[in-house]
Image (tube, rainbow, N blue to C red):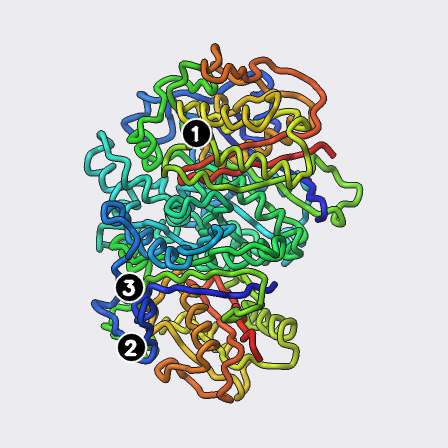
Amino acid sequence: MSRIFVTGMGAISAIGNSVAGNRAALIEGRTGIGPLRQFNTRYADLLPFGEVEISTASLADKLSAHEPGLTRTSLLALHAFEEAVADAGWDEAIVQSSDTALIGANTVGGMCLTDELYRDANSREAGSPYLASYDAASVNLYLQKRFGLTGIINTINTACSSSANAIAYGARLIQHGFAKRAIVGGTDSLAKFTINGFNALHILSAKPCAPFDQDRNGLNLGEGAAFIILENETALKERKTYAILSGHANSNDAFHPSSISDEGEGPYRSMKGALELAALRPGDISFINAHGTGTENNDLTESRAMLRLFEKVPPFASTKSNTGHTLGAAGALEAVFSILNLYHQEIYPAQNWQQPIPETGLRPVHAYQQLPLQHVMSNSFGFGGNCTSLVFSAC
Amino acid sequence: MLLYVHQSSCISPQQTFGAKDLDSLQPAVNNAFRIIEPSYEGIPTGILRRMGKAVRMGTGAALPLLRNRATPVDGIIIGTANGGMEDCIKFLNQIIEYQEGMLTPTNFVQSTTNAIASQIGLMTSNRNYNITHVQRGLAFENALLDAAMLAADHKAQSFLVGGVDEISAYNYNIDLLDGWFKQETITGNDLYSYDTPGSIAGEGCAMFLVNSHPDEAVACIKAVEIIHSSDPAWVAAALDRFLLHHLGTQQPAVFMSGEDGDSRLHAFYQACESKMNAQASVLRFKHMTGEYATVSAIAVWIACQIIDSAHIPTHMVKRSGGGRTNSVLIYNCHKEQQHSFILLEAVRP
């Protein structure tokens, strides 16, 4: 199998509007968790969220994106897409080549427009401008039209692991010769739909989330988008490379629609599979960007799976304490953070952590550190038992 | 790519599940082709009651292929544009109507588009690869491509791949408002006789057991092409390249056109059909299925039946060709922007 290189990145989240902005916040230990400002829900002041600071209208202005029916989810994607493509130094011809694939992911699509969707779904009167914008595919169909993309385009939805699977799918397309390069990632915006869904499941914390802390009591929803550029070895000519995508694996926990099995069977298998594909031993992993949502169930089961797989659990932390859980964007956003770990040889600290979970005793990294890192694992686990792990390696 | 189809299962508006009969045509009712629901043997009643229609038909079509296997399949790969849209909007309606009060999470959990693949995984205790492709009119095609890559990498493994979408009151309403369904009353074959925009709503599900081994396979999926374009000439040029690359100077025995009576898509279907010479039979199938994003899954299932039985239902024939049935090229266009070519061939000469 040919090696897959990361040659560009773009990211927007509650802690920054660029990869550099996100990195600065991670180093400083700054979080983007707080009350909602951009849209109206009864939970705006009751629960904290990781909201992107820019309003939808300002995003549209900034990106000169005024096509009818454009949603916040698509605008966030467009923002990260443009940063990633510029970072890779691609011109229009490369973007439009039939050898360039676009693999995206999201879970809410245009359902951030809850009230418009309600009217369009239930009324026989004239529709809103968003009739074609509600599904997950609408984001990539917009990017396709805007940039005149002609290669393979796909959207993946495996809930919270969606964009980790988008990254793996793009890499496989390249390795099988269906593309020479791929723009891969994900996006999601805050929506009444997900806020009320997660709230009904009683897994939203009223406080800033505390991943892997014994008193953790839920997650904070966030929003954002991230894309990374993947290219095969032959496409590289003295170009900047950030990292190698060396492993990926997808496994289903097959236990429960919205929680992970006690022993973390799915997480264990996805981490193990990613190591095997990368031809690495557990001891080779320098750091884990954990899924670490801050829920009772996730952090305990992920910890147990790590204890099963690793003789000595490597340093780990969850950046969801900075960004909130960005759902369909999380796998890609945390892939960017994992690549930054490797590229800058540094680890970003977990926030709000005080005491280890008594059953496991595991302590996440809670201070910024610089240290040699060779292989970083990134975990993403979703509803429906969809578990995916990625491994990035230093070039 | 090479993907061999060994078993298949289809729940559709026609008699495709259990005792199959593709020669007699079931008409549309109230301008929609809705599935004939089977009894869903093997799904416990309590679980069945909680399932939305998309999850129900997806699981119902998949389980017969997964039961009685010595080893679990090595991947569950589903293409669906909307998954459980009915549950999705039911939950949305609760949000609005109860002003974000205390809601029950059942509809929310069922509404995620990955619920079909994950439910199949859950019910068969399958911890292997599990994924849901949602690229609207090319969701199933991406699922096929995914399966083909897995089959090429893992010669000893077998995979479940399928396409599922439902008509919910809500997505029907949204697509109707967006102009994708005709106002005229349609019952079946008359679908092609209108020169007006819009088609007729459909739903269905087809599941396939696939791997890289030709032994005893029903058919081979030889190529899948995924195209995004709004230009008929671009699509026709892509078909020229596709034919040259995969068939050389030959023509497929059968051209299955996704023609759906929508006047806005005539130019695409005409441009592709015009590439076929008199040796190719031209067939249509949307009068059996209606129009929806993952209808190409059922087109592949029908193509497998034609290849396996060497028989073409007469109501499908738009133009008779040389009478051969050993290869089928499916062209489908979804909402002007998404197109696919899927080429199937007989495994036995």
Task: For label 2, count other residues whose C-alpha is less than 10 Å away and answer few (under 14), some (14-19) or many (20+).
Answer: some
State which tag comes first along the sequence, 2 or 3. Answer: 2
> Which subunit holds the residue at mark 3?
B
Tag 2 near tag 1, CB within 8 Å: no
| Nearest to viewer (mark 1 / mark 3) | 3
Q: CA distance from mark 2 to mark 3?
A: 13 Å
For disc 2, the marked residue is B25
Tag 1 near tag 3, CB within 8 Å: no
Residue A222, disc: 1
The location of residue B311, given as percent across then percent down, is 42, 82
| Residue found 59% across the figure and 58% down from its top | A150
Residue B35, disc: 3
The location of residue B204, given as percent across then percent down, is 34, 62
| Residue found 60% across the figure and 74% down from its top | B243
Quarter residue A42 falls in: top left
Task: For label 3, count other residues whose C-alpha is less than 10 Å away and answer few (under 14), some (14-19) or many (20+).
Answer: many
The location of residue A1, given as percent across then percent down, is 70, 49
Quarter residue B29 falls in: bottom left
Tag 2 near tag 3, CB within 8 Å: no
The amino acid marked with disc number 3 is: Ile
Q: CA distance from mark 1 to mark 3?
A: 39 Å
> Which subunit holds the residue at mark 2?
B
A151 up-or-down from B269: above or below: above
Residue B299 vs residue A253, the one in the foreground? A253
The amino acid marked with disc number 2 is: Leu
In terms of secondary structure, where does tag 1 sit?
loop
As drawn, is B34 to the left or to the right of A15?
Answer: left
| Residue found 40% across the figure and 26% down from its top | A297
B148 up-or-down from A389: above or below: below
Quick check: do tags 2 and 1 share a chain?
A: no
Residue B279 vs residue B152, the one in the foreground? B152
Task: For label 1, count other residues whose C-alpha is less than 10 Å away and answer few (under 14), some (14-19) or many (20+).
Answer: many
